[in-house]
Amino acid sequence: MSFFYNIESTWLSLKHHAFRSLLAMLGVVLGVAAVVGMLAVSEGARVESIERIQRQGVDNIILHSEEPQANQTGGETIYFYGITREDIDHFRTVFDNVKKVVPIVELRKTIYANGKPTDVILMGAAPEFLALSRSKNADPRGRWISESDGALASQVCSVGVDAARQLFGLEDPLGKTVSVYGATFEVVGLIENPLKSKLAGKYDINNLVYVNYETLLSIFNRDALNVEADYVYVQVENLAYLKNTADRVRTYLNETHELPDYTISVPYELLLAEQATQRIFSVVMGSIAAISLLVGGIGIMNIMLANIYERTKEIGTLRALGAQRRTILTQFLFEAVTLTGLGGILGVLIGFLIAVLIKYTAGMPTIVTPGSVIVALAVSILTGIIFGTNPAWKAANLSPIEALRR
Amino acid sequence: MSLIQLQGISRVYGSGPAAVHALRPTDLSVEEGTFVAIFGASGSGKSTMLNMLGLLDEPTSGNYLLEGRNVAKLSDADRSDIRCRKIGIIFQSFNLFSHFSILENVCMPMRFAGVPRHEMHERAAELLDRVGLGSRLAHSPSQLSGGQCQRVAIARALANRPAVLLADEPTGNLDEKTGDEIIGIFHELVAEGHTVVMVTHNAEYEKEVQRIIELHDGNVVRQ
Ligand SMILES: Nc1ncnc2c1ncn2[C@@H]1O[C@H](COP(=O)(O)OP(=O)(O)O)[C@@H](O)[C@H]1O
Ligand SMILES: [Mg+2]
């Protein structure tokens, strides 16, 4: 029997029972639509959270200095706390699997530009921060802060593109100065972070002013700073040993710091945790999908049995004219698979719509992946095969004479 | 050699005291190119015998030689193949496929026989032309009268050039005049060398046929 005949006969049969066929498909349509829609939401959430984590750099261990709470200090006010230069030197010199240690210190003082106070924040950063944060020089005439700026305590700064706009508006920032807490810094460069990443997940990198870390520490003393570093990025050589290195950092800090005046965040561990959560989510989604498709499959089985009951005489006639059992089997299986396949396609389209709707009404990111579409379609077709086989088998095994008697 | 030879063919429905002997052991032969009518009262076993001949049913006992080959105990696949190529069946209520055109209806047995598409359509059109429906190939059965439907069914039965045409009360659903037309077509076919076995209980047709088989309570009482 030709494939063409199967298509034609299926088409005629579905057309003949258009409404009933549509009802039968409904279960599969809704099941697939729900699966595609929900997978789009979870994929959107996954990609967003992974991107957010990756923007902090997966190969980093990020240390934050934290002011100890009064209940942890026994009521004493601590003026000086956090990660120290000694810690930083230790990581640099004693630890292996450490590529760079990049300290950053925040000067919590108002920056003045053109004599006016601004909201822009000044950071003392080690020169490696540029490469580490995957930022780049935004103006070829300028430069990023250098090692020698630190050695010479040069009072120069490099500004993020957004910070430059806040400080100087449309004017050329290069050569301008900013003053903060009695010190003046000349702007020597402009930088941009194309990923629009955040420093320690908190400050927009494009909206900061950067002075060499060493310069900042040598200019400002303890009345301006109560930490030696607010953030320290420890970048590892080999991602495979990151967990080990992070554990050693934890142990070291635990042993050397009396008070819990720091926290550690490891984006890579967050990423792994996120992926684990995602896997659980996928399993839950998969189960929902399985149930809804099961319901859809039962609908299909139902309609196929009704079809066969109704068309018993037709089946008998086909057999009397010489149709083989397998011809009948293929024809009904083909019908079932067509029903679920069409249901699957319709479901995918509706799922797309759901994804778009959620994106624009709920503002959640949604991503329909080719994988989810392929899986949804494959499962629909499989549903047709699984639930169509029994009715088709029944049809094929009707005795011709019994079938004709109807 | 006879086209059809039944040797001790019988059919019993059910078993034990409730068993119905629809056809008692029968010996019978049909020669090629004859027009045979099976007569008998309702329930006498006419359809049972025709179903045996058409391989739609399996005998309880006996042999059935079709063109010398014993087809009584073949597999379902082989029986289907013989139905497809050797037997043309015509029903009382036509049994056309209502959602296909009459051309497609006539094509159906040729599809099962694997006839190439082009050849199939050509032959189907030819056959419909010969039963006087050449101008209505695309029509659906519901657009035709009963007599025309039965003509389509005859064309369909002839599609694979079968060895024998079997018809179970082919005029049962038709008025007298239309029924006579159908019998006329059978006459033409027999004249061309076809073999036709027809079940009827219309005594009028006794004089039309070359051979009469009469059944009574599952027994052949005249042949
Ligand atoms: N499937 C069946 N089960 C039981 N009895 C049957 C079956 N088919 C036919 N019979 C019986 O077999 C006998 C012959 O039936 P049938 O060949 O249909 O008669 P006819 O065609 O001459 O009217 C009848 O008594 C009928 O009731
Ligand atoms: Mg009968």
Image (tube, coloured by chain):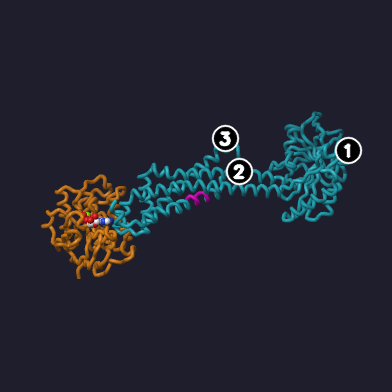
Chain colours: A cyan, B orange
Q: Position of residue A47 (x, y in %)?
A: 63, 45
Quarter where residue A73 is shown? top right
Q: Tell me, yes or no, whether dots 3 and 2 are on the same chain.
A: yes
Q: Where is residue A176 in the image (x, y as percent from the top left)?
A: 80, 35
Closer to us: A32 or B135:
A32
Residue tagged 3 = A361
Residue extent of the magenta highlight:
A375-380
**Image quarter where ligand 1 lies:** bottom left
Residue projecting furthest to the front:
B17
- Chain-order first, disc 1 or disc 3: 1
Q: Tell me, yes or no, whether dots 1 and 2 are on the same chain.
A: yes
Task: Report in which chain the residue with disc 1 lies.
Answer: A
Identify the residue at image location x=28%, y=61%: B16
Q: Is mark 2 on a helix, strand or loop?
A: helix
Residue tagged 1 = A222
Q: Residues within 10 Å of mark 3 (few under 14, many from 20)?
A: few
Placement of the N terminus of chain A among the 4 image quadrants:
bottom left
Residue tagged 2 = A44
Task: Report in which chain the residue with disc 2 lies.
Answer: A
Horizontal relation, residue A238 to residue B195: left or right: right
Q: Is mark 3 on a helix, strand or loop?
A: helix
Q: How crowded is mark 1: few (under 14 residues within 10 Å), some or many (20 or more)?
A: few
- Chain-order first, disc 3 or disc 2: 2
